[in-house]
Image (cartoon, grey):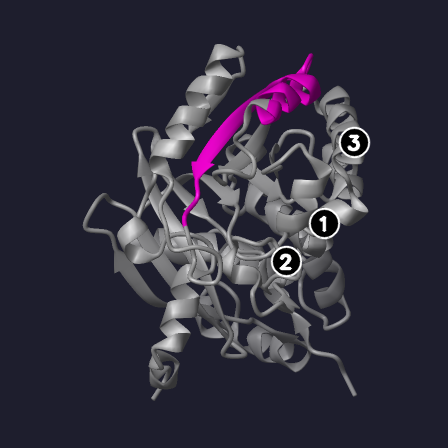
Amino acid sequence: MIKIIILNNLFENEIKNKIADLGIKSYRADQIFRAIHKQGVMSFDGINQVSKADIELLKKEFTISSMEILKDFHSKQDETIKLLYLLEDNNIIEGVLMKYKHGYSLCVSTQVGCRMGCDFCASTKKGLERNLEAFEIASQIYLVEKHFSINLSSIVLMGSGEPFDNYDNVIRALKLLNDKKGRNLSFRNMTVSTCGVADKIIEFGKDLPQANLAVSVHSFNNEIRNKVMPVNYKYPIERLFSAIREYLLITNNRISIEYTVIPGENNNDEDVNLFRKYLKNTNYIVNLIALNPINAYNNKEYKEEAKIFMEKLKASNINVTLRRELGSDISASCGQLKKSYLEEGERNEIHS
């Protein structure tokens, strides 16, 4: 049985090598790649430059997989748009389109669900369903740009899933997006966020030193971090920061430290001391996040506590900002919208 190959997962040189066996001219690889990754085509019918005879040959061994924007939800508070994407297997993933002074940024998902088990994240509550293919990661960008007639200035892999738990597909997707014959998005405008998979942090620095890295820390105390982030059992804070320092030596980048303020847990004076200890002589920026609650964790808001803690950190000369809250009225935090959408029974409306 011939295995059908997903054409939109391939680089141009891979397409060229594979179509040669079919007797298709090598220059067709350029046309196919541009159609998929520059024009956002998701069907053979959309590849107008290639002859019908060659298309029929391609269909014997390849498929062009597709996905679609299922619904979009517009915030009444700001210009944030929350997105639900429908995959070919009827799974749903999320995204967030954010508008800043410098342009549009898209929060991108890398898995259906997540197995990291972070206590305050909605996308992990049902565990990992599957990894996203490289084309499913890249296609989020293509769909949004086409749907809203915009050009994204940056992407952040901070949606559902742990990017380093789907490492190979994530790296392939970012390289596809960077390809000059495709979307040609600079690595400098890509940020990958991890909950602290230390081994992959070093590998990422070697593979894509130009891209940006954000690390969700949420506590520098191993006991507390174990409670809210089970990944800490495998990669405790000492090991994590050893990897971060090696990453910084490799890349000479500045790293983003993501820190959700959980009052009474990680915003005490001792926590300020731990910030100083671990961030000493490190090129970093701390992004404080006010806890955006989910029903399974807590049902309070903690904006003021986050502001107070930020002032404590500033007083200790910590380079810190407080992340601007976007789209809170449309469940813009990771996993929240999909969860509410499924719970309301709207899932049955898909393609009905």
Percent position of residue 309, x then y: 45, 26
The amino acid type of the residue labelled 1 equals Val
Percent position of residue 88, x then y: 52, 76
Look at 34% across and 77% down and name the residue there. 344
Look at 59% across and 41% down and name the residue there. 192
The amino acid type of the residue labelled 2 equals Gly
Percent position of residue 44, x then y: 50, 73
Q: Earlier along the polypeptide chain: callout 3 or callout 2?
A: 2
Q: What mark, if any, has residue 117 been given in the picture?
A: 2
Q: Secondary structure at mark 2?
A: loop
From the viewer's side, name the closer residue of 336 and 225: 225
Q: What mark, if any, has residue 238 been given in the picture?
A: 3
The amino acid type of the residue labelled 3 equals Glu
Look at 41% across and 48% down and name the residue there. 292
Looking at the rendering, the stretch of residues picked out in magenta corresponds to 270-292
Residue 18 at least partly seen: yes
From the viewer's side, name the closer residue of 18 and 26: 18
> How many angstroms separate mark 3 from mark 2 (CA)?
20 Å
Residue 186 at least partly seen: no
> How many angstroms separate mark 2 from mark 1 (CA)?
8 Å
Give yes or no for residue 286 being in the magenta stretch. Answer: yes
Disc 2 to disc 1: CB gap under 8 Å: yes
From the viewer's side, name the closer residue of 64 and 317: 317
Label tally: 3
Q: Earlier along the polypeptide chain: callout 2 or callout 1?
A: 2
